[in-house]
Amino acid sequence: MVQHDLQYWQDKAADLSFPCKAFINGEFVDAQSGNTFDSINPATGQLLASVAECDSADVELAVSAARQAFTSGVWSNKAPAERKAILQNFAAVIEQHQEQLALLESLDMGKPIGDAMSYDAPATARCIAWNAEAIDKIYDEVAPVTSDALALVTREALGVVAAIVPWNFPLVMTSWKIGPALATGNSVILKPSEKSPLTALYLAKLAKLAGIPDGVFNVLPGYGHTAGQALALHMDVDCITFTGSTAVGKKLVEFSGQSNLKRAFMECGGKSPNLVCADVADLDKAAATAVAAIFYNQGEVCTAGSRLIVHRSIHRQLLDKMLALVEQWQPGNPLDPNTSMGAMVDEMQMQRVLGFIEGAKAQGAKLVCGGEQVLSETGGYYIQPTIFDDVDASLDIVKQEIFGPVLVVQVFDDLEQGIALANDTEYGLAAGVWTADINTAVKTSRALRAGTVFVNNWDGGDMTMPFGGFKQSGNGRDKSLHALEKYTELKSTWIDLS
């Protein structure tokens, strides 16, 4: 991959045209109301674009188009090999437009361009390609019954799938939803977050270019309480799939029950523990990984390792190593390829995180680094990497998902206590354990109540591994072949041969 400098990205940004309209039934259109909302560059606080603000009227149009496309069979009845070829082409087109997608992602959300180029854009293409390749690799079943009957167990597409995705990884989260939903023959309506809608709209252009039929993929930018709620309550939407906060996830499940009992799959928040045992084999690796686990993407990650739980015997040594690394994570211009941590997504999120920091200080938490807004002269929304040490488990910063560059450190004396601290949360999305003992690794990973457990790493995995949480971190799974199950109905057919 060619490495570009800051000037290259600034020049490219100056020439960039921003997608602003909704995408319904194969066409880019204004919202029915004519309303728009502002997309702001979090690095500067300046306006990027005015984007169509869709509401219930636009939802009606999109659902009608999606249903008509599904019923017509233009996609749902297309031969698996043909759907596969079109989605493979979609992946290839995404790959060809990686720079544009990465730049939009960085400008709209504040993440470093280096991360958007090395992970977000290519991972999106990989996800679509992986799901495309799976289409003709999954077989249905014949049940073992008596000779006078034939019993078939088959899967069919759900129909119309509404996907609501978050603002922190707009491209990747979109691909995790639409990849398996499209692969299994559904029509999809995507609602990106109003905080970062631009790459979703650009993907719509690429989907059209790749040959996805009109009505099969639609994009509705807008607010959660209008467009999102209308989708979740709509009687002709068969599934609502969501990534975001637990509070919103609970509302969407309620809306499912209030309407047509549509399938509701929620991937929600996390407060993930990173448990470091006394016998950790590589303390330098553990320190570097713990720092990256919380400060990557400005801490705006649902699986952020936001609680470091370390054995008392190595607590000071590990913390010193981490503090020495923090300078490498000072925030900077997201378009500078040398930047490790960019801007918070908007002023509201910045103020929310700063509020947690001030609250923790008022409650007596020990601040050992960071805790301040910086680079305010840019007009952007930047926060220093922040660490609180030896924090009491009762404090808000230990209990609540902050979604920012804030780490809390807790200390344990024996493994049982460490596991208890790790599991003392309403969430269960991810967890980690560092140890040189395979028995400790296996037993601890089994004891940790989380959908994903990382052993001697953080955030390992690929498309072959399912992703999702225990407890109030949600239900259902993204990624892997298991994700395809979410977007299909299981049908039993009994044929009498007597």
Image (tube, helix red, strand yellow):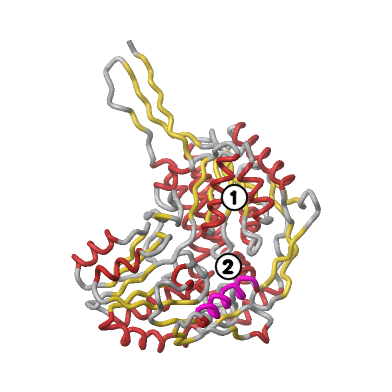
Q: Identify which residue, 275 or 477, lies in the foreground.
A: 275
Is 354 in the magenta? yes
The residue segment tinted magenta is: 348-360
Circle 1 — which element? helix
Is 171 in the magenta? no
Is residue 157 shown above or below 366? above
Answer with mark 1 or mark 2, whichever residue precedes in sequence.
2
**On the picture, is 414 further left or further right than 353?**
left
**Quadrant in which residue 52 is drawn:** bottom right
Magenta stretch: helix, strand or loop mostly: helix
Circle 1 residue: 210
Q: How many marks?
A: 2
Tell me where residue 493 appears, x and y as whole percent: 41, 24
Tell me where residue 486 appears, x and y as whole percent: 46, 43
Closer mark to the observer between disc 1 and disc 2: 2
Circle 2 residue: 102
Is residue 426 shown above or below 144? below
Mark 1 neighbour class, 10 Å CA radius: few under 14, some 14 to 19, many 20 or more: some
Q: Identify which residue, 44 or 246, lies in the foreground.
A: 246
Q: Quadrant of the C terminus?
A: top left
Circle 2 — which element? helix
Q: How far separated are the C-alphas under marks 1 and 2?
A: 19 Å
Disc number for residue 377: none
Identify the residue at image location x=63%, y=82%. 7
**On the picture, is 304 further left or further right than 440?**
right
Q: Is any part of residue 323 visible from this angle?
A: yes
Q: Identify which residue, 67 or 194, lies in the foreground.
A: 194
**On the picture, is 37 further left or further right than 309?**
right
What is the three-letter code of the residue carrying label 2? Ala
Tell me where residue 200 appears, x and y as whole percent: 62, 57
Identify the residue at image location x=41%, y=71%. 305
